[in-house]
Amino acid sequence: MNTPSPHLPPSLPHLSRNTLPAEKENTYFVFVVLVSVLLWMALIMTIIGAVYGLVIALFVWLGHGLLAAHLRAEAVRVNERQLPALHATFLTVCQQLGVSQPPGLYVLQSGGALNAFATRFAGRDFVVVFSDMLEALGPSSPEIKFILGHELGHLKSKHILKQTLLAPGLFCPLIGPAYRRAWETTCDRYGAFAAQDMDGSLRAMLTLSGGKDQGRLLDAEAFASQHEEERGFFVSLHELSSSYPTLSRRVRDLRALQTGQTAPRPPRNPFAYFFALFIPGGNLGGGGGAANGLIIVVVVGLLAAMAIPAFQKVREASQLKVCLNNERMLSAAFDQAVLENGKPPTSVAELVGPGKYIKQMPVCLNGGTYVIPRGATSGEEIFCTVHGTMENIQRKFNPAAVRH
Ligand SMILES: [Zn+2]
Ligand SMILES: [Zn+2]
């Protein structure tokens, strides 16, 4: 049997519209901006990176457009005639949070998932609530106010824009996920402030944790204590690499919010920080699946844009080296032929073949053929039709050395 939660006052005296963003969100923001600016600059300065960047931007734009189209065509747009009770609740929440132009609210059938997300396309904001979430919480409850307030928090904090502009920084291990977790903490504060009801806010979180029937019956204190009790290496690593605070922690933070105190921070396993360095940020299992998938595509593309030119350089260098060695071999054969015959050979065919100086024709990896120029007196004059003479190739390896 469950003991009902003690009655809590309906309003939150410690919170006002101005104190909703979590403090550490601003701290992490500075770091993520710094990393992102550096990575964007590196990308733009390499021309090939800029080209990749444009192609990726085009795909992100297309993906977002399709997501927005999916919502507009398949999801139910909430208004006075469609789900009017939810519409009225949404307007109340917008007013409470000082949102003067309410974004489009949509209800989307999503195979039983209890979730909601916010997104933005072509200057239009969207809040999306999955239909099972709406069924679990009802259209007018403080619980649904919490959820709507949370998503409006993402829009008010410009998280969708930041997700794109700061993609490189968000991909960084440790700092990226930490910054995203701060977003969620901020938005839970928006949700609680929108609901003006701690019991309801907690029940919304418990529904996310325990499901639509049994979740609301859970004991918030017991669930919150899981956060203090489960502190091993893997739980720490999970926390550090994930872009959401754990559900038990979010319940604990909401309970602390009610009293205006900061909850004590149970320690993490120090080794987990080291291993978390190797787990890049991203947003797996979060709200807007399609948008998040695109962000991952962007980041992989950025890395590819940086890696591919480097890889090509290495490959080109090894091809040059093979050709240089071929020319050295032919040059030595040329000089030997001069010694033996008393006159320089006039074609490579005189040097290569069974019983001659070189058994098989050396192969240039870029399809060049080797030529002895008319009137050549030294093996150094032999050239490749693609790469030129030995001197040409050596100059490519070390341009400065030849000038002196
Ligand atoms: Zn969120
Ligand atoms: Zn060659």
Image (cartoon, rainbow, N blue to C red):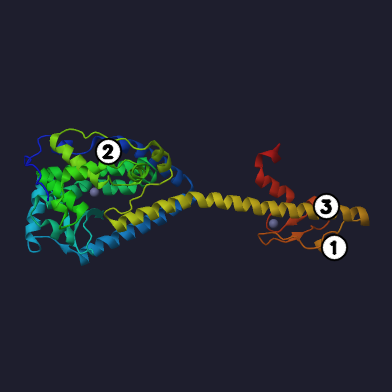
Q: Secondary structure at mark 3?
A: helix
- Mark 3 lies on residue: 332
Of mark 2 and mark 3, the one earlier in the sequence is 2
Q: Which of the numbered marks, if any, corresponds to residue 350?
A: 1
Contact flag, marks 2 and 3 (Cβ < 8 Å): no
Contact flag, marks 1 and 3 (Cβ < 8 Å): no
Q: Amino acid at mark 2?
A: Glu
Q: From the viewer's perspective, is residue 83 above or below residue 152?
A: below
Q: Is residue 187 visible?
A: no
Along the line of sight, which residue is nearer the eye, 377 or 11? Answer: 11
Q: Residue 87 in the image: x percent, y percent? A: 9, 57
Q: What residue lies at 34% left-to-right and 46% top-to-bottom?
A: 238
Q: What residue lies at 27% left-to-right and 55% top-to-bottom?
A: 288
Q: Which of the numbered marks, if any, corresponds to residue 25?
A: 2
Mark 2 crowdedness (10 Å alpha carbons): few <14, some 14-19, many ≥20: some
Q: From the viewer's perspective, is residue 317 above or below residue 260?
A: below
Image position of 361 (left or right of 116):
right
Contact flag, marks 1 and 2 (Cβ < 8 Å): no
Q: Residue 147 in the image: x percent, y percent? A: 16, 51
